[in-house]
Image: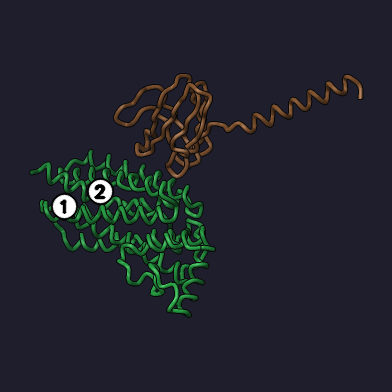
Chain colours: A green, B brown
Amino acid sequence: MKQQIIAWVGAASVVMLAGCTQSMAQPPGHGAMSMPTASTSGTKAAELRAGLNNLFSEHVYLAGAATNAALGGREAEFKAAAGALDANSVAISKAIGSVYGEGAEKAFLPLWRRHIGFVVDYTVGVAGNDKTKQDKAVNDLVAYTQDFGAFLSAANPNLPKSVVADLVKHHVVTLKTVIDAQASKDPARAYTALRAAAGHMQMIADPLAEAIVKQFPDRVRQLDRGERLRARAPGRNLGARSSSGFGGWARRDVAAATTRAILSEP
Amino acid sequence: MGARGIIGAGSALAVIVAALVASAAPTPAVDIQVFQFQPGAVEVRAGTAITWTNRDDIEHTVTSGDPEHRSGRFDLRLPGRGTTTTVTFSEPGVYPYFCDRHPSMRGEIRVNSTNERSER
């Protein structure tokens, strides 16, 4: 049973770390990174930004739920949370693939999941009060931030590797705080930390959205023009991508759908 | 134009033709970009040297086999962007490889004994 709990905790941690790892772009106003300047206030750009924010914050909350269930020994709850968390990971990888292709999607998902293993290691270390294991997991996660930064930087030159890595490090710290608070049976501190960790994801999602818009400005402009045309002639072009935009889509699918649209619409 | 001129012109032409032929022959090369071997599968004839170039700002490796079964034929580091490494494939066969730092990165070299060579 103890091993099971440790495994759950690990998986949950992984989930949380996955959320951390996701942090790639830099937050608006972060002086260290030369941020993309393209506006995300336009319709499609705004949808992309909102969709990525939703995916990333969802990731943190699901990770926190999984970790908390694992540390509490609630197996069924943990399995459900871990499953939802992995579905979120897949959705994020699809969003990446929508922009950078199937190859990038396939490369991203295992990279993302890999860091989850380090989070699991950390959670197991916390559950077992094993400081050595905890330290190793943290070191692995810090090293991993370089890989994650390199991936995003390679995909989008508007995302400097060092800035992305720093953001992910901060995300790791915020998630670590959540896990530590959960393990110490301090729910007030745990939920405060969880809100902070989820809030931090905006500092990743916003710059990532802006970087994508900056990388593909013509696509975004074309989409916005298409939306305006469809709005003027509501009886036309009401296909899969309706004139109502992405509002009717499941929230978790918004980012993937928008990024897919950015690259696929003529 | 004298005989020397004709010979000189002929030599120059031969050099140009040789250069054109050389440039027309595709160079077996694999880029490592956005954590992918591109192309992922390459088919060459025996005796061909293949060069990998790391385009990512992170260390990758070109390691023979797969993470569960390393063949030990080669294990080469490409420590950063712009670094390259080359392997000559003398014997026909199928040579899977992967990145030891990122095991989900996989590639394959198929070596034929024929003169045919293509990239997939």
Q: In this rendering, would A197 be left or right of B95? A: left
Q: Which of B2 and B31 is in front in this view?
A: B2
Quadrant assignment, res B34: top left
Whether label 2 touches label 1, CB < 8 Å: no
Q: Name the residue under label 1.
A: A79
Residue type, numbered disc 1? Lys
Q: Is residue A94 shown above or below B23?
A: below
**Which chain contains the residue that carries disc 1?**
A
Q: Nearer the viewer, mark 2 or mark 1?
A: 1
Report the residue at 12% width, 46% height from top: A5
Residue type, numbered disc 2? Val
Report the residue at 46% width, 62% height from top: A262
Quadrant assignment, res B36: top left
Q: In this rendering, would A69 be left or right of B60? A: left
Q: Position of residue B78 (x, y in %)?
A: 47, 33
Q: Mark 2 points at which residue?
A: A14
Q: Position of residue A211 (x, y in %)?
A: 47, 59
Q: What element carries label 1?
A: helix
Q: Is residue B50 shown above or below B56?
A: above
Q: How crowded is mark 2: few (under 14 residues within 10 Å), some or many (20 or more)?
A: many
Report the residue at 52% width, 25% height from top: B49
Q: Answer whether residue A49 is visible to the viewer in this image.
A: yes
